[in-house]
Amino acid sequence: MKSSVKNPKVILVGAGPGDAELITVKGLKAIKNADIVLYDALVNKELLKHTQEGVECVYVGKRSNLHKYTQGKINQMLVDYALKYGTVVRLKGGDSYVFGRGAEEVDFIESQGVETEVIPGISSALSVPASQGIPLTKRSINESFWVITGTTSDGNVSKDINLGAQSSATLVVLMGLRNFEVIMEQVAVHRHKLTPFAIIQNGTLPNEKITMNTLNNYKGVVSSIDYSSPGIIVIGDVVGEHPSFLEEEIQRVLEIAF
Ligand SMILES: C[S@@+](CC[C@H](N)C(=O)[O-])C[C@H]1O[C@@H](n2cnc3c(N)ncnc32)[C@H](O)[C@@H]1O
């Protein structure tokens, strides 16, 4: 396809975890200057209001196996729109390079001779626990954290869950809710049964919900999971730093005792 514009370009912008204010200044500026925007399911639609009048915003999200466009089709759209309109903003949830297929898109776009730029975003992996008051690291508690996918491209649980469970790292599991029981079963083999964990859904949004408990009780929280909302699982002693973890734990112990 021959370009009708001077400088075709695709800018990958990380939209942040949900709260529309958790985007970078640079990301917002790119949205304001975009000629067209392609956005994903977990992007806060408020951000689209910052586009200039008449700028089209195309939804290309893939949630709950409802794929309107395949990844191949999206890649091609990004190139075609850049050649047709000029600057395409590709808006993705969190950070484009954390389980966001951003690198695949950049590879394809550049292979077609179109310029790219990546504007980092605040990943849900870091910001959702932080906004709940859970530090991913705390001196004298842990020395690292792992961000792991709970569902690999073939639908299975990543082997890294088992490896991570053998370390003392905080485990942050994205896309893990549907495999929650298998994940927790694997972690429970290696970690102390009183290891705290949290499930945080719709993090940083008004309908945010957190469920906390300890590893020996993971089966008891399964019924509280809302599979239609995005959620992360955080496992490790740092979850005990949540402002109300101790209070809730005391409550649970009292309920069992009396
Ligand atoms: C395809 S991954 C994309 C991750 C994204 N690139 C990032 O950096 O946050 C989608 C997963 O991120 C997690 N996620 C994204 N936004 C979230 C939110 N607001 N609250 C909880 N989990 C979220 C969920 O585990 C969801 O299934």
Image (tube, rainbow, N blue to C red):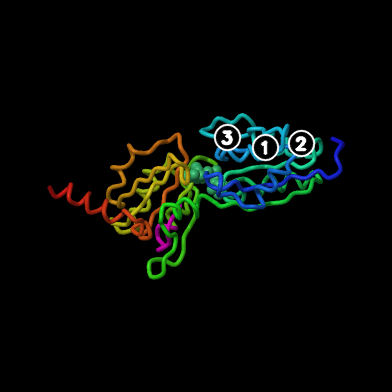
From the top left corner, tell me how far across and down residue 249 is, in percent: 25, 53
Above or below, 140 against 220 in this view is below
Q: Which mark is residue 235?
A: none
Asked whether, in this view, residue 175 is left or right of residue 15, the answer is left
Does 141 sit left or right of 107 as displayed? left
Name the residue carrying label 3. 62
Residues shaded magenta? 164-172
Asked whether residue 175 appears in the rendered view, the answer is no
Q: Name the residue nearer the viewer: 222 or 200.
A: 200
Q: Please report the residue visible at 22 percent of the width from the left and 50 percent of the height from the top.
A: 251
What is the number of the mark on residue 38? 1
Alpha carbon separation for disc pair 1 and 3: 12 Å
Residue 106 in the image: x percent, y percent?
71, 47
- Tell me which corner region of the image, top left, top right, bottom left or bottom right, holds residue 57: top right
- The disc at residue 81 is 2
User: What is the distance, in whole Å, between disc 3 and disc 2 at their CAs?
Assistant: 20 Å
